[in-house]
């Protein structure tokens, strides 16, 4: 028995020795060949990253991501294929935005994992299961709303709304019955799901679009028995809408006559227990009120406003209340009266109250609490004009204690008619289209910096897609576009804040006037890291320019990540947390310069493209190698 026991012990020791040796050998192999490398059988789609170092994986992922962003998002329906640009460029940086932005750094860090996933123990567990594969999804940002809009714009012929059977009137006032027409629409959700699956896997295969049929809810057969009722509804008299009060400061119009040919379009149908009945569509009435009546009735409230020069009030304007039509209530009243035989309805108007203060003394404004500054040297004339219009719109505004200020709300409509802004060209494919809003990010950035200087809590701020020369230092910019992104902050000083603008040559300033409460605000110097070079300049043959004419956007910019720290220290007793801090982070994508060249046969031949395709780069341009200068992400 003792001999057998000794043999068993010896065998056990031998097994332990062999296992230890194998483990040591495995550790030696891992330390020499696999430490700091990606685990075997790790993929992003069909991109095999097994055994790659961080730098090797980053280069592969960056190359694949850059290719997708350069080629654009591809969609196909039958024989038609369209590539939606990953970035929409403009001749004013404020109107440029990114539809798709990959983050190769974050993707590579995700693949490597934390310290445990990079350890020998995790490697060993991974090796014990030879059938285990690791599939990673790439990290990216996709603007789904913009993608849908561009998709619909590119395939307009696929969106045909269904039309119900309906009545209209002929010249003699007789009813005409119109046949229903079926429609169709793009399967937007399916397209975005397929696109997401492709982008997850760094795959830029065309997304095959599908369509859904749209069926009318009212057919010609439904209308056949409703003709007498429709004639009775519409009648021959006009429907009258009137205001019960004088509309001061706008059109003198206070009565609207709705003709029978308009009334007939408000008729709808309702099916109850398989019985079709005529109804009055309150939605259609409401649309009419908002489009045709509201512009003559609505009046925006005027906030209190005054100007200070050399510390003294030089002009004063009290706030005035406004008004707007209550379209929902008015539509309900019209429908109810109409069904009861009534032809005269009063328009319901809501008052938009505004605070009225009797004098500038009520505001207790006596000193500057913070100043924001930015420079717009080199801006084109339209941009300078828009900056001046935007600055004037902000100057003299008052922010109540406790109020959340919204730049978008206070800018209001941004167009040529009501506010005097000038348009700038935006590049979509190989076409240019005018859009308003250029230069407003200069307003947003400077207002943001004034709020920081004043130590106010920032509730919303978004950086630009790429670094813009007007807004250096990097990381301290704020993008503005109607209706979003916005710049918002809260006036927590306990007193009114007055906004005053100053333009000195090419420098824009916003001064916040109020009462200092002893708080101090500091911002650190922005830290820039993860620098990525952009693709070479892209050239597009354009049919919008004269033959041979060349027009280029702002120069190319490196991508980067940036952060700075914002600290506000409050005086003792003001708050339970006297020191409040926040880190503002910004991610900027590498941005290539784009030049449009007016279509000529020579240009098309040189670039190897035709004006119809609007292709991109010249044959002698090669993709830039992406390089990074990285530190650990804060």
Image (cartoon, helix red, strand yellow):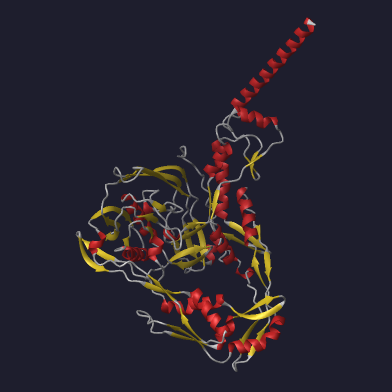
User: What is the tally of numbered marks visible in this picture?
Assistant: 0
Q: Nearer the viewer, residue 168 or 109?
A: 168
Residue 247, image quadrant: bottom left
Q: Tell me if I can see residue 105 in this picture.
A: yes
Regarding residue 609, the answer to whether it shows in the image is no
In the displayed structure, does residue 513 sit left or right of residue 256? Answer: left
**Picture coordinates of residue 400 (x, y %)?**
33, 59
Q: Residue furthest bottom?
A: 172
Q: Residue most toward the top?
A: 2
The one of 575 and 265 positioned closer to us in this rendering: 575
Q: Quadrant of the C terminus?
A: top left
Check the picture and name the quadrant holding the N terminus. top right
For residue 152, above or below residue 17: below
Residue 606 lies left or right of residue 19; in this view the side is left
67 up-or-down from 212: above or below: above
Residue 68 in the image: x percent, y percent? 58, 52
Q: Which residue is drawn at 65% across and 57% down?
A: 207
Image-quadrant location for residue 52: top right
Q: Residue furthest front?
A: 340
Q: Which quadrant would residue 158 be assigned to in this image?
A: bottom right
Along the line of sight, the residue nearer the viewer: 258 or 597: 258
Q: Where is residue 77 in the image (x, y as percent from the top left)?
A: 66, 63
Position of 135 with respect to 139 (left or right) is right
Asked if 241 appears above or below 435 in the picture, the reply is below
Nearer to us in this view, 417 or 198: 417
Residue depicted at 66% across the width and 45% down the height? 46
Q: Position of residue 15 (x, y in %)?
A: 72, 16
């Amino acid at each position: 028995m003792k001999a057998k026991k000794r043999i068993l012990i010896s065998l056990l020791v031998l097994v332990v020795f062999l296992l230890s040796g194998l483990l040591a050998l495995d550790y030696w192999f891992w330390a020499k060949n696999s430490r700091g490398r990606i685990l075997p059988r790790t993929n992003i789609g069909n991109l095999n990253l097994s055994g790659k170092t961080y730098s090797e994986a980053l280069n592969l992922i960056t190359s694949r991501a850059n290719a997708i962003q350069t080629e654009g998002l591809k969609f196909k329906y039958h024989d038609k294929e369209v590539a939606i640009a990953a970035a929409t460029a403009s001749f004013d940086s404020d109107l440029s935005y990114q539809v798709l932005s990959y983050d190769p750094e974050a993707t590579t860090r995700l693949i490597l994992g934390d310290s445990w996933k990079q350890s020998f123990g995790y490697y060993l567990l991974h090796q014990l299961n030879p059938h285990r594969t690791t599939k990673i999804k790439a990290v990216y940002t996709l603007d789904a709303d913009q993608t849908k809009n561009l998709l619909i714009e590119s395939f307009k012929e696929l969106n045909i709304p269904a039309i119900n059977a309906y009545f209209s009137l002929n010249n003699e006032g007789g009813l005409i019955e119109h046949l229903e027409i079926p429609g169709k629409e793009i399967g937007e959700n399916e397209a975005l799901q397929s696109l997401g699956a492709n982008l997850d896997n760094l795959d830029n295969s065309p997304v095959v679009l599908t369509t859904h049929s749209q069926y009318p809810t009212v057919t010609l057969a439904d209308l056949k028995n409703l003709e007498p009722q429709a004639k009775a509804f519409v009648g021959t008299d006009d429907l009258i809408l009137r205001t019960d009060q004088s509309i001061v400061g706008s059109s003198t119009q206070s009565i609207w006559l709705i003709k029978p040919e308009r009334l007939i379009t408000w008729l709808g149908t309702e099916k109850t227990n398989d019985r079709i009945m005529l109804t009055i569509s309150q939605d259609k009435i409401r649309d009419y009120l908002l489009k045709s009546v509201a512009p003559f009735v609505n009046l925006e409230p005027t906030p209190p406003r005054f100007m200070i020069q050399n510390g003294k009030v030089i002009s004063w304007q009290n706030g005035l209340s406004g008004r707007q039509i209550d379209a929902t209530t008015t539509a309900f009243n019209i429908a109810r009266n109409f069904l009861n035989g009534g032809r005269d309805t009063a328009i319901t108007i809501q008052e938009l109250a505004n605070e009225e203060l009797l004098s500038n003394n009520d505001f207790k404004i006596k000193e500057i609490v913070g100043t924001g500054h930015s420079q717009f040297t080199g801006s084109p004339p339209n941009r300078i004009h828009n900056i001046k219009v935007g600055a004037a719109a902000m100057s003299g505004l008052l922010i109540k204690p406790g109020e959340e200020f919204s730049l978008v709300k206070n800018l209001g409509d941004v167009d040529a008619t009501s506010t005097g802004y000038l348009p700038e060209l935006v590049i979509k494919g190989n076409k240019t289209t005018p859009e308003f809003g250029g230069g407003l990010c200069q307003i947003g950035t400077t207002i943001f910096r004034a709020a920081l200087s004043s130590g106010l809590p920032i509730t919303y701020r978004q950086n630009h897609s790429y670094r813009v020369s007007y807004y250096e230092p990097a990381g301290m910019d704020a993008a503005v576009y109607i209706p979003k992104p916005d710049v918002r902050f809260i006036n927590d000083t306990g007193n009114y804040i007055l906004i005053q603008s100053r333009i000195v040559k090419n420098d824009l300033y916003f001064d916040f006037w109020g009462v200092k409460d002893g708080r101090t605000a500091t911002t650190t110097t922005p830290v820039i890291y993860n620098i990525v070079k952009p693709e070479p300049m892209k050239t597009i043959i354009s049919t919008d320019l004269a033959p041979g004419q060349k027009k280029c956007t702002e120069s190319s910019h490196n991508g980067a990540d940036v952060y700075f720290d914002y600290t506000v220290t409050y005086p003792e007793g003001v708050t339970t947390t006297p020191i409040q801090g926040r880190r503002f982070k910004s991610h900027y994508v590498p941005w290539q310069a784009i030049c449009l060249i007016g279509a000529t046969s020579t240009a098309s031949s040189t670039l190897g493209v035709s004006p119809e395709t609007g292709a991109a780069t010249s044959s002698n341009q090669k993709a830039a190698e992406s390089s990074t200068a990285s530190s650990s992400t804060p």
